[in-house]
Amino acid sequence: MRRATGARVQAEGVTLATREGPVYTGVGFVARPGTLTVFQADSGGGRSALLLTLTGRMRPSEGTVYVDGHELPRRARRVRRISSLGLMEDVNALDDRLRVREHLSEGLLLRMRPAARGLADEAMEAADLGGLDRRTMVKDLSMLERRRLGVALALLAEPRLLAVDDVDGGLNGEHQAAMWRTLERLAGEGPTVIATCADADALDRVAGPDTRGPVPIRQDPAHGPDDPAERGGGGADAGPARAHIDDLLGRGKDGDGSEQA
């Protein structure tokens, strides 16, 4: 697998609000290539929406974001080309009716460009699934294997920015630590990694010098716009996002409605 240099991510004052209230507010950070940045919030705390924003798949209400020098949402299409998502509920969930090898084949087709021979093998190795029987049905995978398969599928795009949501979801402490180790290693070898979690205890035990976080995600109403409908807000953690599935999946126009090359 070609190890692309990670993308630098810089955000300042990034906020997303809907009619129901703020999804996340006042996010500001810099993620350098070769690092793992972790955000923490409970379910419904804006985790998925933040990752979708940082990867050019959702438009924030206010603030500035640059990914590899590309401003969001104006250059959202370019950011989508260099970023990938791990598993995310309601966005790219695994299909229990498929085998692992079928998911990999589908992932290679979705690249929309030729893939190097052995790319799927290398992605599975990178996600620490090299020994998994690919004839296995997805429904028979453990939760840890499902999380890892989501990372492997994301790596098929050879991203410069990898976003992994809900890293700890459904995992015991040992398996959480194993996932964090995998993500730390991936960050050191290639893409910049930004992840979210609810429980960061396992991260605290294994975090290295290039790991930042956990950074709490805030939902301070004072940061929300008076009329979010006029600010283009929406969020994976909020109801209005379900009406914008094309945006969630990164299809169609750029964040400002213009067609950017």
Image (tube, grey):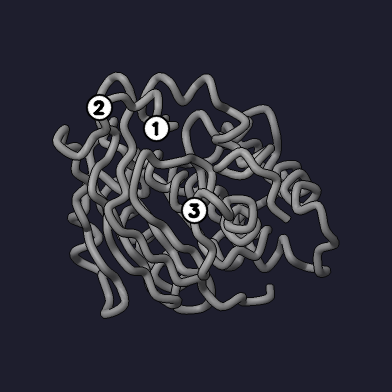
Callout 2 crowding tier (Cα within 10 Å): few <14, some 14–19, many ≥20:
some
Which residue position is annotated with label 2? 226
Which residue position is annotated with label 3? 72
Q: Amino acid at mark 3?
A: Leu
Disc marking residue 80: none
Which of discs 3 and 1 lies nearer the camera? The answer is 1
The answer to whether residue 186 of the structure is visible from this angle is no
Image height check: is 259 above or below 119? above
| Relative side of 180 to 131, left or right | left
Whole-Å distance between the Cαs marked 3 and 1?
14 Å
- Judging depth in this view, the residue of 79 and 121 nearest the camera is 79
For the residues labelled 3 and 1, say whether their Cβ atoms are less than 8 Å apart: no
Residue 191: image location, x then y, percent: 52, 70
Residue 134: image location, x then y, percent: 70, 49
Which of discs 3 and 2 lies nearer the camera? The answer is 2
Task: Name which of mark 1 and mark 2 comes first in the sequence.
Answer: 2
Task: Name which of mark 3 and mark 1 comes first in the sequence.
Answer: 3
Q: Residue at x 37, y 49 (%)?
A: 167
For the residues labelled 1 and 2, say whether their Cβ atoms are less than 8 Å apart: no
Q: Amino acid at mark 2?
A: Asp
Which residue position is annotated with label 1? 231
Whole-Å distance between the Cαs marked 1 and 2?
9 Å
Secondary-structure class at tag 3: strand
